[in-house]
Amino acid sequence: MNNRQRTLAVLNYESYDRLPLVHFGFWNETLDKWAEEGYITAEEAKEWHDGGPMDVRITEKLGFDFNYHSLFAARTHLFPAFEPETVAEFPDGTKHVLNNQGVIIVEKPNTTGIPPEIDHLLKGRKEWEEHYKHRLQYNDDRVLKAKVRAGDEVVPFNEGGLEFLQTGERDYLYGISCGSLFGTIRNMLGLTGSTYLFAEDPELFDEIIDTVGTLCYRCVKTALESGAKFDFAHFWEDICFKNGPLISPIVFDEKVGPQYKRITELVNSHGINIVSLDCDGMIDALIPTWINNGVNTMFPIEVGTWDASIAPWREQYGKDLRGVGGMNKTVFSKGLAAVDAEIERLKPLVELGGYIPCPDHRIAPDAEWDTVRYYCEKMHEVFG
Amino acid sequence: MEELLEQLAVCVERGKVNAASPYPPDMKGEDGADELTKKALDEGIAPDDVLAKGLVIGMGRVGQKFSENKVFVPDLLMAAKAMSAGMAYLKPFFEAGEAHHKGVFIIGTVQGDLHDIGKNLVAMVVEGGGWKVVDLGVDVSPEKFVEAVSENDGCVVGLSALLTTTMVNMEKTVALIKKSAPGTKVVVGGAPLTAEFAEKIGADGYSADPQGALSFLDV
């Protein structure tokens, strides 16, 4: 079996020769550190992206099989994006930058993580009509110009990518991104802005959700109807935090649920039965909406920070719910014994079936190269 | 008086900002926290009572429900917006010394960390609980916390971190605060934190959610 076959076998509860060993990429700082330490080249660190040629090289060096987050992604985001612009600079090096989403963010030297947002261009109907609506309309170029991994090369969809995907002949897993149905909106409006908009202008809120959902739907439709073959479909959201969702589950179910349904029905009609979704945080309250609307594989199941696990979800939702993730990546900074203990913890979860362990998010800069390699060696030893 | 203050509390709890707001749909057209706070003050209710028996009660209810996962972040945000609408009328009374906060709470995300959602939620709930909040923002150095403590006698400090790679900076901050202003209470929180970690670094308290931070302060 190749990695593509064994992954689909696990997620479809079929027999497989061994468990695929997957990851979800790295922080850029992690790769910079490993390049400085001589484990990877500067080019590999600089040119890395999910599923790209450098990703494949780093994956092999570490001993993983592949990066699960390897996707064909049509442009389901703002296009053209806003031109980033520095709007203020301060003596300590801090900058206020209007980013490509029309959000003013704070960039500070020597800091890590997602930058705080201090203002949003999108505030209501006027800004929506003027700056955003036209950037979220469908056109064929959103699909045709998007990049495809075609074996060892990366080519545009309309310059060889489609022909490669039509054959369906590859030994690696490759999915189609369906974009984000609420995360995109949260990115444009911010958490507070999206809450206020829902409360104060529900009609506009509905219109934005429908616009984003329609764009995602049409991009996926064009790609699939062209004859391209994918192994799974994948959404992202990132709309939860430590204590639960950043949106009311009732509102999410009522407003966003139907958008999921029409896209998952579309991918199902093209033979894709694994539909995964990337959402950080405590996602439990949103799972019913996803499961009921055709999303069946949760990713990356963050165990390290809020003890998420596929086990209680499996108990609640049965085999309809699969998972990729749930491996506590913080052990990569805690030494070999911690890795051994984590692999022991994973054993009964793997036995549940329909579950592939994967570090529960990007591998962070406190991870030691040798410890990650040890994890891969041990995983192969334990799970084949 | 009690009926009016209860109506005010309900407006905050439900996120009913003012009469013009269509939210929540079942209260459309009704007065909100804005109008009812003004009315309460106009009727001669003491500002401290408007705060403690109206606004704070409403915010406390929603904070409690939030910690029990009965309501979610958007409910908290709308409640805070309603609370702010009422607090605007109380501002002159605070300045004149006719209304009083329970104390001062200094909050910030520790050095090296830019995340602010959790910090902002805690600030909202604590402010809604009747405390004056001094928000130092994100990427706050230990020295900046100490400076703020020196400017606010008897304050309590809240430290936030989202990343495993920055939570180590909490230890340095706690140590410097304790060294320069012994007796200052420090409460910590954030996604990767635990009560054990809080104890290990010498913090006085750990809270998993905003209401927990307020409970720590109110003791």
Image (tube, rainbow, N blue to C red):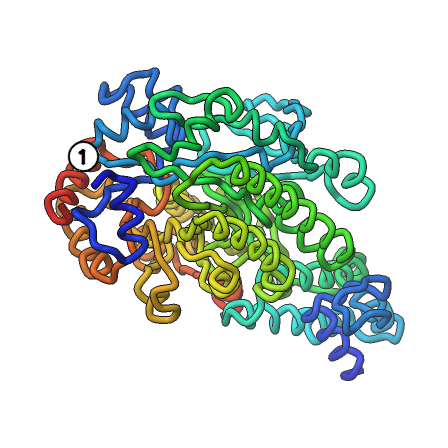
**Residue closest to the eye, A283 or A143:** A143
> Which residue is drawn at the image coordinates 81% and 75% (left, top)?
B45
In this rendering, the answer to whether B117 lies above or below A105 is below
Q: Image check: B42 left or right of A128? A: right
Determine the residue located farthest toward the left in the rendered image: A381
Dot 1 alpha-carbon crowd within 10 angstroms: few under 14, some 14 to 19, many 20 or more:
some
Q: Image check: A263 left or right of A214? A: left
- Residue A259 visible at all: yes
Screen quadrant of the C terminus of chain A: top left
Give residue A50's quadrant in the image: top left
Q: Image check: A326 left or right of B122? A: left
> Which residue is drawn at the image coordinates 38% and 63% (left, top)?
A320
In this rendering, the answer to whether A176 lies above or below B68 is above
- Residue B186 visible at all: no
- Write down the residue under mark 1: A373
Screen quadrant of the N terminus of chain A: top left
Q: Secondary structure at mark 1?
A: helix
Identify the chain of the residue marked 1, using the numbered disc in the image.
Answer: A
Determine the residue located farthest toward the right in the rendered image: B42
Expressed as whole percent of the image width and height from the top left, the position of residue A208 reads 71, 48
In this rendering, the answer to whether B163 lies above or below A302 is above
Expressed as whole percent of the image width and height from the top left, the position of residue A206 reads 72, 54
Expressed as whole percent of the image width and height from the top left, the position of residue B54 reads 72, 74
In this rendering, the answer to whether A14 lies above or below B108 is below
**Residue closest to the eye, A211 or A120:** A211
**Residue closest to the eye, A6 or B7:** A6
Expressed as whole percent of the image width and height from the top left, the position of residue A156 reads 50, 23
Q: What amino acid does circle 1 point to?
A: Arg
> Which residue is drawn at the image coordinates 29% and 55% (left, top)?
A355
> Which residue is drawn at the image coordinates 16% and 55% (left, top)?
A344
Q: How many marks?
A: 1
